[in-house]
Amino acid sequence: MSHYKELAKNIIENVGGKDNIIALTHCVTRLRFQLADESKANDELLKKMDGVVTVMRSGGQYQVVIGTHVPDVYQVVCELAGISNEKKVVKSTKKMTIMEKFFDIVSGIMLPSIAILSASGIIKGLNTLLELVGLYSAESSFFTLFDSIGDAMFYFFPIIIGYNTAKKVSMNPYLGMTIGAILCHPAINGVDMNFFGYKMNVTYTSSMLPVILIILLAAPLEKFLIERLPKSIKSFTVPLLVLVIAVPIGYTLVGPFANAVGGILGDGINALIVLSPVLAGIIIGAFWQVFVLFGVHIVLMMPSIMNIISGQPDMFMAIVKVVSFAQIAVVLAILLKTKDKKLKEVAIPAFISGIFGVTEPAIYGVTLPRIKMFVISCIGGGVAGGIIGLLNIKVYNMGGMGIFGLPGNIDPAANNFNNLINTIIAIAVSSAVAFVLAFIIFKDDKVEEKIEDDNLHENQIEILNSPLKGNLIPLSDLSDDAFAQEIMGKGIAIEPSEGELYAPCDGTVMTVFPTKHAIGIISDKGSEILIHLGMDTVRLDGKYFETIVEQGQKVSKGDLLVTFDIEAIVKEGYTLETPVIITNTKDYHEIVPNNDSTTDVGDELLTLMV
């Protein structure tokens, strides 16, 4: 995982440094940071990094979308930032709303378990499939063993959730795990219990809400006891008192209440589906990818996850699991129709990852920038959801995403494949609708059409002029590794002798940083140029810089872009070594910098060969 070290290092730097990180989790494709001060995060630089799809701010989290290799990046980020199992005690400067706190807590509790939960569901689904095709019988030892492997996580889910919840609320996680284990103990599940004349019979195995609420009760009790008990005895008396106080209250009062709430949540979604399964399917399917965009989809899945782990088939999960196929159908249509090599390079891996249910690369890299295509994928999702409702399709096991989710649609009690076949029909019809619409409507961007019309060929050359007067410096000599190791792209650096920055080409100003120290331009020929005035000059917060242009403005080669006070900036202790970077380096066969020692404004600086 050493090749992720530079990416991880730059992510940490651009979320405001390791001291700005309160907590970090990850899901299938995203690093989910909780930052002390989100204003310190540099969205634009992160979005332009090779290895980062995009960034999102949602639900009180700063989300860096990486892709399917996010677990590896997460590990390296944790190592470099010194993030351990113990939550860092850092006060956030941003006050979270109640809704943001809710999303943050639920995500923090659920996300660490989703991958293993999905793996367990796949095992259960495949075990049912192998039994249905006659490889072995439901009475065989093989079936029993694999059913136990797949079922264990579901049955003992309170233990896993107890651990996660305790970590999230800064409680001893092993105490949280113990509370979950107590709730799974066979002596107190599904049996008549009598307390002060009140008879009750409850079951907490394969549940989630009871242990969460009990630990939310136990956490402040633990903190209270830690602060007040003598050091010599609190190592064992704190857990002792927490268990004998919180668990009885939780078992008799909080747990039944939580089960009732869980039932209400599940019944609410089911009531919508029962009212009109087709309409519910269309609405949920059409808007599901919007929820994915905002990173709140895990929270919306919680009632369905509770249904499935308790053994109740669920239609909501059946709807959301087929939406990804409409998305990749649109990507396939674009892939077959586009003549843009850059788009093809993005679309191919996005299509492959989408087959396995990971749609963020397809959304952010392909369809969302072409909003009509995103809308078509939502239409396809709505069609899929409507068919799911019409055919009364349900999910019986969690399973994975994409094609790995299909075994979860096999009904283990019906001893047939009807539910799975109907799911495949829904996928086929919705994918066909999305594919045909996208293939008919999609057109390459105007810039791409112009390239075709001009008959530009493989040896096309673009020359960028120097935007500054000064000394030329190879990128490898810079102190900032992000530039020195060409993580941001290839180019050259200039140490300016005059405080004026000029446009190196005809193009459009795409980004003007609020701190005025950097500017992004896309040339009329398609090169994406980042000019970064000085090292760490972002800390000046715009002091001594003055921008002449604004975002979206057309500029001509030689137009004045920024003025800056060299003497004042150097006096503040900053170097003005200025990288001129081609951020879409991968689009070029070769980028050749000027090999002179000095340059003047208007001199040839970089030669770009396609």
Image (cartoon, rainbow, N blue to C red):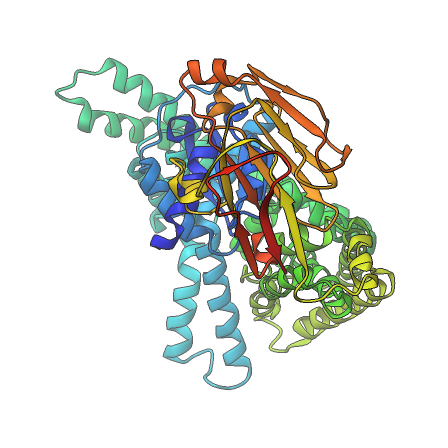
Q: Residue at x 72, y 31 (%)?
A: 559
Point out residue 452 in the picture as x, y percentages from the top left corner: 80, 63
State the residue in front, 71 or 5.
Answer: 5
Say if 5 sits above or below 328 in the image: above
Task: Tell how many labels.
Answer: 0
Residue 204 in view, yes or no = no
Residue 284 in view, yes or no = yes
Say if 48 sits above or below 67 in the image: above
State the residue in front, 83 or 206.
Answer: 83
Point out residue 248 in the picture as x, y percentages from the top left corner: 37, 31
Point out residue 572 in the picture as x, y percentages from the top left corner: 43, 14
The image quarter containing residue 437 is bottom right
Residue 353 in the figure: left or right of residue 548: left
State the residue in front, 496 or 46.
Answer: 496
Say if 546 sits above or below 16 in the image: above
The quadrant the N terminus occupies is bottom left
